[in-house]
């Protein structure tokens, strides 16, 4: 069984984890156009390279990030999300009447 | 013909019959460059040459003819999808399959064996009933059948009510079929090359030149080629190739693994699939049992085989067919599936004016081969998107008009 090192739980079988998609910054959904939002939701880099992606340790519901080579399947490193997210992400509030 | 055979039999050298002549020198310019010589790419070339008189065409293949997912899929042909767009498209493809051997005078060993999809829950029965109604409405043969009918149809299927997930009902699709996958690419390539199309193997496209919204040339490991337009038909590398032309795609590429046993006497006629236990099994005309299932749990550009997947495929296959416990495994392999969010392909125009997409073929590409060859060639020749592939354009994701075939696709090819 392939091992994945969880920043919280240490090395575990990869079958204990769920792949959570590519890491890419989320645009402000109140400001972007429908087209830009579609791009964020549906379109992926899907690169054949070392990529950063979300993983979740299913048993403990712990989400973290991993750098993985999508050609060799080698996991370069895993790290806690607070390495990237160091403060609360705030989105602008829609003015009243604009929340269509 | 018997004399030809006799002459061949008496010949001391047994000269090999060449099905097609691979091109040698790359020209400076082609009217159409097709990237990828699988069933789709050669099918498009064939239709361009035969029906549209466009023969200044190069099919560029980084490996050898039919070496990608054309060789790796499990050769299932069916049209029992759920949406109107999906059923119409695959129904037309199944019709073309029926006459394909005659079309290019090359035996693809088409066998109409039917496909049986198993329901192990009430929810599955409800969705099967829905699919059967949609299919019948659109002229596709699908019907819901009960346990007794299933037991009569596939006597060696485990119908025990004590199994982990007892079989409750089935969706019987009489139009389901299988064919020799390699022969499809060979037949199309032969027909295309006879009409003047050039097939360049070991020719990898490494970059695509786009100037003010138009493709002007492709750069390969054998030099630069100018082109009137480009069609990409590279299942398993759609994102990577489209990125060279600056086109982002809504695709994640996952490996899909399958395996095959040693040959045995004919015992299983239809293709049997269970979306619930994630496995499908059919016996080839050579007698081997082909066992396939769902994609790997995470994306990867690698066709390695894993023990995990072998365990889960085997466990599921044995639950349906306990007699397979005695079978010896011959090999296990993987193909790369370009999965789209709605499990439907991406076909037609792209943001680059003369760059056409035949992408996002996930786990449903083989069955669509003939209709892709026909419609994509029509698009290239006439510059008009055929009605039947209009719903599958890339632009649908920007309009939030997906064609959801996830339920009719997952692990039930």
Image (tube, rainbow, N blue to C red):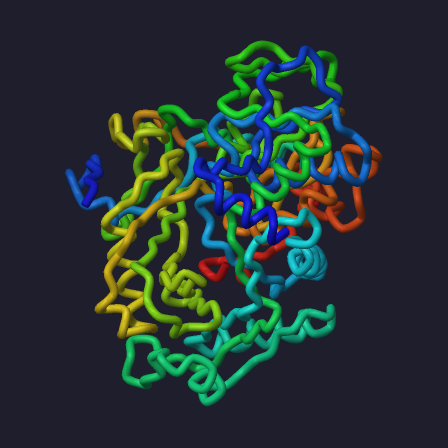
Query: Residue B279: x and y, percent?
Result: 38, 62
Q: Relative to B58, does residue B168 appear above or below in the rendering? A: below
Q: Residue at x 32, y 73 (%)?
A: B321
Query: Residue A96: x and y, percent?
Result: 68, 41
- The answer to whether residue B344 is visible is yes
Residue ranking furthest to the bottom: B148
Residue B354 placement, left or right of A38: right
Q: Residue at x 41, y 65 (%)?
A: B283
Q: Residue at x 65, y 24 (%)?
A: B58
Query: Residue B292: x and y, percent?
Result: 39, 57
- The answer to whether residue A96 is visible is no
Residue B204 placement, left or right of B192: left
Q: Residue at x 23, y 68 (%)?
A: B325
Q: Quadrant of residue B305?
A: top left
Q: Quadrant of residue B80?
A: bottom right
**Circle count:** 0
């Amino acid at each position: 069984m392939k091992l994945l090192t969880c920043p919280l739980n240490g090395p575990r079988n990869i079958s204990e984890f769920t792949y959570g998609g590519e890491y890419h910054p989320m645009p402000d959904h109140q400001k972007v156009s429908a087209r830009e939002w579609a791009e964020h939701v549906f379109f992926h880099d899907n690169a054949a390279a070392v990529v950063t992606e979300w993983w979740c340790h299913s048993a403990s519901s712990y989400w973290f990030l991993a750098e993985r080579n999508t050609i060799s399947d080698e996991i370069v490193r895993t790290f806690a999300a607070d390495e990237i997210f160091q403060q609360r992400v705030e989105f602008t509030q829609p003015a009243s009447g604009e929340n269509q | 013909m018997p004399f030809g055979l006799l002459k061949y039999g008496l010949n001391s050298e047994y000269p090999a019959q060449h099905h097609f002549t691979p091109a040698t020198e790359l020209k400076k310019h082609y009217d159409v460059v097709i990237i990828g010589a699988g069933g789709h790419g050669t099918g498009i070339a064939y239709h361009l040459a035969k029906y549209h008189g466009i023969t200044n065409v190069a099919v560029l293949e980084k490996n050898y003819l039919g070496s990608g997912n054309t060789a790796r899929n499990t050769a299932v042909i069916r049209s029992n999808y759920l949406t109107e767009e999906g059923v119409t498209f695959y129904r037309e493809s199944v019709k073309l399959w029926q006459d394909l051997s005659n079309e290019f005078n090359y035996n693809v060993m088409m066998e109409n064996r039917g496909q049986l999809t198993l329901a192990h829950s009430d929810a599955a029965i409800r969705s099967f009933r829905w699919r059967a109604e949609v299919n019948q409405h659109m002229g596709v043969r699908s019907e819901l059948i009960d346990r007794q009918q299933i037991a009569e149809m596939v006597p060696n299927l485990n119908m025990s009510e004590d199994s982990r997930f007892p079989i409750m009902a089935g969706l019987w699709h009489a139009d389901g079929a299988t064919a020799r996958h390699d022969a499809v690419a060979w037949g199309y390539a032969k027909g295309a090359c006879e009409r003047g199309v050039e097939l360049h193997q070991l020719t990898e496209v490494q970059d695509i030149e786009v100037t003010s919204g138009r493709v002007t040339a492709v750069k390969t490991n054998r030099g630069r080629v100018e082109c009137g337009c480009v069609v990409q038909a590279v299942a398993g590398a759609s994102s990577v190739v489209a990125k060279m032309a600056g086109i982002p795609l809504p695709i994640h590429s996952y490996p899909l693994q399958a395996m095959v046993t040693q040959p045995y006497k004919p015992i299983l006629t239809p293709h049997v699939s269970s979306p619930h236990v994630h496995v499908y099994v059919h016996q080839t005309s050579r007698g081997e049992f082909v066992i396939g299932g769902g994609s790997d749990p995470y994306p990867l550009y690698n066709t390695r085989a894993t023990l995990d997947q072998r365990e889960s495929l085997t466990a599921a296959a044995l639950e349906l067919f306990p007699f397979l416990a005695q079978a010896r495994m011959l090999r296990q392999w993987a193909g790369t599936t370009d999965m789209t969010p709605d499990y439907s392909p991406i076909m037609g125009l792209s943001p680059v004016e003369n760059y056409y997409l035949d992408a996002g073929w996930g786990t449903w590409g083989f069955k669509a081969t003939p209709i892709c060859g026909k419609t994509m060639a029509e698009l290239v020749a006439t510059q008009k998107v055929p009605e039947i592939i209009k719903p599958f354009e890339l632009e649908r994701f920007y309009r939030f008009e997906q064609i959801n075939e996830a339920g009719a696709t997952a692990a039930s090819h």
